Amino acid sequence: VYDAIFRRSDVNRKYAIVAALLKNFSREKSSPEGINEARAIRIFLGSLGLIGVKMAQFLSTYEAIPEDIKNELKLLKDRAPQLSKDVVFDMIAKIYGSFGDGPVSEVLECIGSASIKVVYLARLKDGREIVIKIKRPEVEKKVEEDLAFLHDILSDQVVQDELRNNDVEIPQQLGNRIAEMILEEMNLRGEVENQAKLREGISPAASFRKRLANRIFNYFISKIFKTSQRK
């Protein structure tokens, strides 16, 4: 797998992977625990960027993976450099015509930064604080390239033969499942809709409305049932 990754990488990807490997291994070597096999696998996958992180997240739930490796893979998080606040300002300006015409009065600190999106805390003009999630510029193109690269690795004949010879089974639909995970994370509109449904489902008002509707329904059902019995 390691050989196939570098055989099929372009110059820019090779440089990014090597730089990440050197940085990550240097950091882990200085830790008291040192580097064992499970930790080396986590470091390697983490150095591949987004697809490596998503692969680790998927494999950490796969039964055939040894427990010590699964525990290491669960530690892997998707981290990326923060974006400038200017990106937030530009996004708001594109929506409302200018930043001043929008509802946001101030963009505060960055509270999350991953390969696909960044999350900023902001303050509205009425004083309320909100969370703003923004997809990284050209992230769709980057994801498309990463998924194509993953497909090349998983379909590499040398990789398949080597894994088969060592009785290593690649989970079925691994590439498709990782693609689904990434595309789901990119769907910010769907995320907002799901959160709205969750709030609606757990809010006291919604709970009261559901209880009231059930009581009214049961009342009319009982009336209909009693009427039918009389007939």
Image (cartoon, helix red, strand yellow):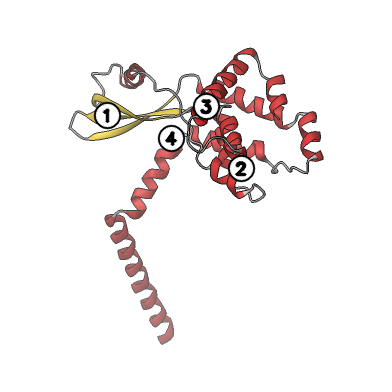
Query: Which residue lies at the image location 38% right of the left edge and 49% below the top edge?
Result: 198
- Quarter of the image for residue 133 reads top left
Earlier residue among tags 4 and 2: 2
Residue 24 is labelled as: 3
Q: What element does badge 2 sit on?
A: helix
Q: Residues within 10 Å of mark 3 (few under 14, many from 20)?
A: some
Q: What separation in Å lies between label 3 and label 4 (alpha carbons)?
A: 34 Å
Residue 189 is labelled as: 4
Earlier residue among tags 1 and 4: 1
| x and y percentages locating residue 197 in the rendered image | 39, 48
Q: Is residue 220 above or below residue 50?
A: below
Q: What separation in Å lies between label 1 and label 2 (alpha carbons)?
A: 36 Å
Earlier residue among tags 1 and 3: 3
Q: What separation in Å lies between label 4 and label 2 (alpha carbons)?
A: 27 Å
Look at label 2 and name its amino acid: Leu
Residue 122 is labelled as: 1
Query: Which residue lies at the image location 40% right of the left edge and 86% below the top edge?
Result: 230
Q: What element does badge 1 sit on?
A: strand
Q: Is residue 107 above or below residue 69?
A: above
Task: State yes or no: discs 2 and 3 in contact (Cβ < 8 Å).
Answer: no
Circle 2 is placed at which residue position? Answer: 59
